[in-house]
Amino acid sequence: MEPFTTLRSKATPLLVDNVDTDVITPIGRVLEGPKAMVEFAFEPLRYDASGALRADCVLNDPRFAGAEILLAGENFGCGSSRETAVWAVRGLGFRCLVAPGFGDIFHSNCFKSGILPIDLPRGDVDALAAIARAGGELEVDLPAQRIGAGATSHLFEIPALRKEALLLGLDDFGLIQRRMDAIRAFERRDRETRAWVYPDGC
């Protein structure tokens, strides 16, 4: 994965609450394959009943084309544990998501695809959205755990291990490999203190 350190980008303000994984990747489109999964991501929001792109959806607004930051509403990514939802969001070009809350499994899956999910109070997300609508860019500083623009700046929390993985561009397997010496040392000590746990040859 690409390491994530700092990011400066336009932001798309999609402040819709309870956008679930079936909205992000409708199951019919997932079955059509990866290309359709990305092309029709957020289909219920982006397309009208005739299949045409809706001009009133911010995801179709040319002002936000190329944005790598998505500002979302409460409980973003709720619903079923559909990892394809994260893949589609990344396929649309977003590397950072900011919302007042995320679905738990979706939140966890973000890190596995190199996406930084930032949980902020709704008022802070609204303030960032105002900057985005005015044409401003946001800056995400992962080492400092800060997001904002100019005088508007917000700190965010992230588990230390998740932060390390993003900074280094590692998935879960990569993190394990990085700690193999410590894992083997623990196993050796454990064998010495709890030999009865390990059958012969194991």
Image (tube, rainbow, N blue to C red):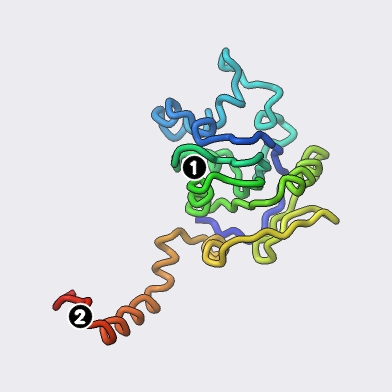
Q: Is residue 145 above or below residue 54?
A: below
Secondary structure type for disc 2: helix
Front position in the image: 5 or 76:
76
Using the image, tell me which numbered label, if any, was put on residue 87: 1
Q: Residue at x 66, y 39 (%)?
A: 73
Picture coordinates of residue 195, whole percent (x, y): 22, 82
78 with respect to 73 (left or right): left
Front position in the image: 36 or 175:
175
Picture coordinates of residue 111, whole percent (x, y): 52, 54
- Name the amino acid type tagged 2: Trp
Q: Identify the residue at the far top of this view.
A: 50
- Name the amino acid type tagged 1: Trp
Q: Which residue is mark 2?
A: 196
Picture coordinates of residue 79, whole percent (x, y): 49, 37
Which callout, 1 or 2, points at the residue further toward the start of the chain? 1
Picture coordinates of residue 114, whole percent (x, y): 53, 53
Q: Identify the residue at the far bottom of this view.
A: 192
Residue 200 occupies which quadrant of the picture? Answer: bottom left
Q: Identify the residue at the far left of this view.
A: 200
Q: Crowding near pointer 2: few (<14 within 10 Å), some, many (20+)?
A: few
Compute the Cα span from label 1 to label 2.
Answer: 45 Å
Q: Crowding near pointer 1: few (<14 within 10 Å), some, many (20+)?
A: many
Q: Quadrant of the C terminus?
A: bottom left
